[in-house]
Image (cartoon, helix red, strand yellow):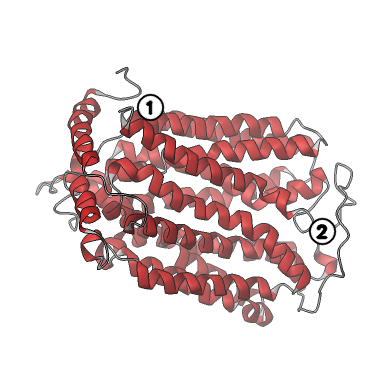
Amino acid sequence: MKRFGSDTEDDEQETPLLHREQEARVRKAPACGSARYCLAFLSSYGFFVVYALRVNLSVAMVDMLNSTHTQSNHSGSVCPSQPSPDRPKHNRTAAVYDWDSNTQGWILSSFFYGYIITQIPGGYLAGRLGPKWLMGFGILGTVVFTLLTPVAADLGAAYLIVLRALEGVGEGVTFPAMYAMWAAWAPPLERSRLLTITYIGAQMGTVVCLPLSAEICFYLGWPYVFYISGAVGLLWFVLWSALVFNSPDTHPRISEQERLYITNSLKNELSPTAKQIPWCSIVKSVPLWAIVVAHSSYNWTFYTLLTLLPTYMNVILGFSIQKNGILSALPYMGCAVTAVLSGQVVDYLRESCLYRTVVVRKCATLMGMIGPAVFLVATGYTGCNYIMAIAFLTISSSLGGISASGFNINHLDIAPSYAGILLGITNTFATIPGMVGPVIARDLTKNNTIGEWQTVFYIAAVVNLLGSLVFTMFGRGTVQPWAIQAPPTHAD
């Protein structure tokens, strides 16, 4: 088979891997009613909660501010205001606050300052304490703080900033814990399917929360955004506690066929000395740093759009998320759909067509990063044609969902025993774009002209392009020697 960004070592390791995968496929356990797919759907529900709790404040903030500090009218937009349906009177019985733009910025960004500090500790603790309760209590803590948001806002902006940072601390352990969980649960030939089901929850949390939070604010008042999303999170914790277990061997209701299928498919990939973390080898791993670059590049675009898309729609296209929530959510809906579809296609190519893992991961990354870059740049040239602008933004985000089956899952390919720690490392670096990317973009769009936004889109496109090329050059698709062998006694 034709080589694709691989080396001799990768080829040598891939051949026995294919034999092991073919052997495991013969004893494959059914998916319907299985414990591993129950885990997939509950983890998807968990990430739905995670992202709902993350973005709800961005929407509620509009109603939390005194009208003299809001910018929700469309009189200053570049394009003509878009019509919106007639609605009943807005419920404005909840308290409002006189927070200036600087204070608003601190409130919205404080989440990431807590989020970034628990990424690597989360991966480490998942291996020591078990991922089930680490993820469970991480999200539960975030839920509790979310329910306390109206109280903190009444106490003052400083209290709300601290509360949001604590929410970030709780959510920071979730992705590393989930990857550590999948290291024990995901058969190699089902990784793309299972992890993209998990991934769709994050996208759907954004899709549902953006328009729904706007409706809740309008009809009930902004405090109910936090009460309702918190209640949804509490229900998830109850289900997670009762139905999820750290490994197939500790699950009391898993079938013997499924347990053997999972454990046998993973027995040659998991390190017998996983408790001894080869930190030196991890830090020197070129394939890991290829994931870091790709992950950070992708997040630059993702976080920039997540935080500034409502602003672009308001000041350029002439409508706001409060009146057009469904349109604002379309890009994330498209991303969720393509993420799941790409997972099915990638695992089909690996299982039935016997494509090498490194090939499909790199192809998915290229399509999931270069495609969005092209349509993002094209968005800047749609002018006031808001239908075409929304279409291009939706296509851009939809193509980005393909990368969920590329670099995003590659942690489990190169080091399944340490996937939680690797995800913690890559997500630490990938959180930085969420802290600085929107700030840079906002600084470049001080006058909110179409030309300024074109510059923002060009920068995001170039970052995406560079990230995809680095992963294509240095990414690998097999378990690295340091991840499956006992760490040497001498220095790496």
Q: Looking at the rendered structure, which numbered label has been put on residue 72?
A: 2
262 sits to left or right of 423: left
Q: Quadrant of the N terminus?
A: top left
- The answer to whether residue 99 of the structure is visible from this angle is no
Sequence-earlier tag: 2 or 1: 2
Q: Front-most of 338 and 444?
A: 338
**Disc 1 packing (10 Å; few <14; some 14–19; many ≥20):** some
Q: Residue at position x 55%, y 44% from top?
A: 337
Q: Residue at position x 79%, y 56% from top?
A: 323
**Disc 2 packing (10 Å; few <14; some 14–19; many ≥20):** some
Task: Give the labeled residue for mark 1.
Answer: 473
276 sits to left or right of 82: left
Q: How many marks?
A: 2
- The correct choice, above or below, for 18 with respect to 60 in the image is above
- The image quarter containing residue 410 is top left
Q: Front-most of 263 and 233?
A: 263
Q: Position of residue 254 (x, y in %)?
A: 26, 62
Q: Secondary structure at mark 2?
A: loop
Q: Front-most of 326 and 460?
A: 326
Q: Secondary structure at mark 1?
A: helix
Q: Amino acid at mark 1?
A: Met
- The image quarter containing residue 481 is top left
Q: Position of residue 437 (x, y in %)?
A: 59, 47
- The CA span between labels 2 and 1 is 45 Å
Q: Amino acid at mark 2?
A: Ser
Marks 2 and 1 close (CB-CB < 8 Å): no
